[in-house]
Amino acid sequence: MTVWETIKPRYIFTAEDMRQYGYCKRKLYFRYVLKKSFSPSVKMMRGEQVHEKTCRAKRVEIEEERGVSRYYNMYLCSEALGLAAMIDYFEYDGEKITLVDVKSGAGVSKTIYTGYYLQMAAYALLVEVCLEIPVKSVVIRYEDDKKERLLEIDFKTKVTVIQILKKLREMVENEVIPPPTANPKKCTDCEAWKLCRRS
């Protein structure tokens, strides 16, 4: 048993849910309580195209010169945490794992917002629980300009993911709708806008 293991929950949330939580908690209420599905936004469709091109058709690559194996589309699930994710890929050198998350768009001037940190921390947490290998950092790779950003994932952020999972379980079980995002500019590009309308 690891430090992260808890009593098995009834719900399995995803690392993507962590990103959405950082964007707007209400979207997860619509998804898990009202069981609503939404048509993907333009940005989401663009992101899926990028993943199809860079990751989805691949499985394993071995870079002999560096002594690194690259594993693509790794699905991890921990019932103990109530958390699952499809990791784009990670590199493993026999001792250390480097997680890589592929994003569409350019990364030169991008600010890494809270949702990304939570998503990356969820990936790291799953690797630690499922593969029993500590992860302290994650690379975000922006495909449009081939830039990379290294995110340090500390213990506190991983604990935050655990706390959010608990809040999400309470939200679903008690059917309590969260308030909309404090930033109304986010709503203009939200696939849940027609249902939400901040009311």
Image (cartoon, rainbow, N blue to C red):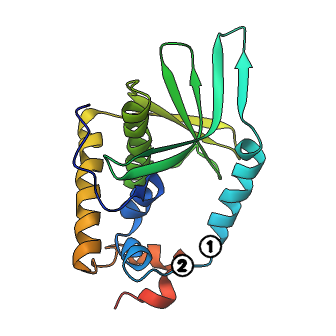
Read off the residue under disc 1.
Answer: 41
What is the count of numbered marks?
Answer: 2
Residue 177 percent location from the top left of the image? 28, 81
Q: Is residue 125 above or below residue 31?
A: above
Q: Residue at x 39, y 46 (%)?
A: 117
Front residue of 159/113: it is 159
In three-dimensional space, the C-alpha distance between marks 1 and 2, rounded to whole angstroms, equals 12 Å
Read off the residue under disc 2.
Answer: 37
Q: Residue at x 45, y 80 (%)?
A: 35
Q: Nearer the viewer, mark 1 or mark 2?
A: 2
Secondary structure, mark 2, is loop
- Res 194 seen here: yes
Label 2: how many Cα within 10 Å (few below 14, some 14–19, many 20+):
few
Front residue of 58/178: it is 58
Q: Is residue 193 above or below residue 171?
A: below
Side (left or right) of 160 relative to 49: left
Which amino acid type corresponds to the residue marked 2 in the rendered image?
Answer: Ser
Which amino acid type corresponds to the residue marked 1 in the rendered image?
Answer: Ser
Label 1: how many Cα within 10 Å (few below 14, some 14–19, many 20+):
few
Residue 63 percent location from the top left of the image? 72, 16
Residue 180 percent location from the top left of the image? 33, 78
Q: Is residue 59 above or below residue 51?
A: above
- Res 111 seen here: no
Image quarter hosting the N terminus: top left
Front residue of 124/11: it is 11
